[in-house]
Image (tube, rainbow, N blue to C red):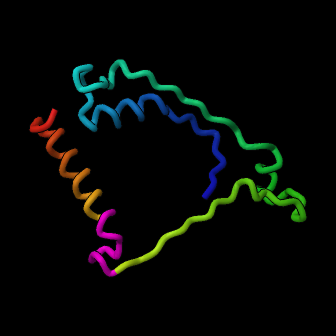
């Protein structure tokens, strides 16, 4: 979905907190949340898109460049109906993250 807001979002501090929570707290780890270079590059939508969202655009004009196509499938390879390779990759990544956070992995 799309949102129109005048809120001020502290993107940099949110991103730093996510890096810190992931355990990157020293340059020896390849990244330190305190010194990592974070670039926030956001652009406003066009005025036409904004009018369409609020119901004021010409309905004959297409805003198709804002559309996406999602594909997926279910399989009986796992209880989660995901391909086994996807399930194993998620479990491996979660385990490595846990080991890194508890200090077992650098």
- Residue 98 lies, with reference to residue 55, above or below; the image says above
Horizontally, residue 37 falls left or right of residue 32, namely: right
Looking at this view, is 83 or 16 the one in front?
83
Q: Residue furthest front?
A: 85
Horizontally, residue 13 falls left or right of residue 19, namely: right
Q: Residue furthest bottom?
A: 76
| The C terminus, quarter of image | top left
Horizontally, residue 49 falls left or right of residue 32, namely: right
- The image position of residue 102, as x and y in percent, is 12, 39
- The part of the chain drawn in magenta is 76-86
- The image position of residue 95, as x and y in percent, is 18, 51
Residue at image point 31% right, 73% down: 80
Main SS, magenta region, reads loop
| The N terminus, quarter of image | bottom right
Residue at image point 90% right, 64% down: 60
Looking at this view, is 86 or 7 the one in front?
86
Residue at image point 49% right, 33% down: 11
Q: Does residue 22 belong to the magenta stretch?
A: no
Residue at image point 29% right, 69% down: 84
């Amino acid at each position: 979905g799309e949102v129109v807001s005048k809120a001020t979002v502290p993107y940099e501090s949110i991103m730093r907190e996510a890096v810190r929570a992931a355990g990157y707290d020293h340059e020896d780890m390849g990244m330190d949340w305190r010194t990592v270079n974070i670039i926030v590059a956001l652009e406003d939508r066009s005025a036409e898109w904004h009018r369409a969202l609020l119901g004021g655009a010409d309905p004959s004009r297409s805003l198709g460049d804002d559309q996406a196509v999602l594909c997926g499938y279910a399989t009986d390879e796992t209880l989660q109906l995901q391909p086994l390779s996807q399930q194993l990759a998620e479990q491996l990544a979660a385990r490595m993250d846990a080991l890194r956070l508890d200090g077992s992995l650098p």
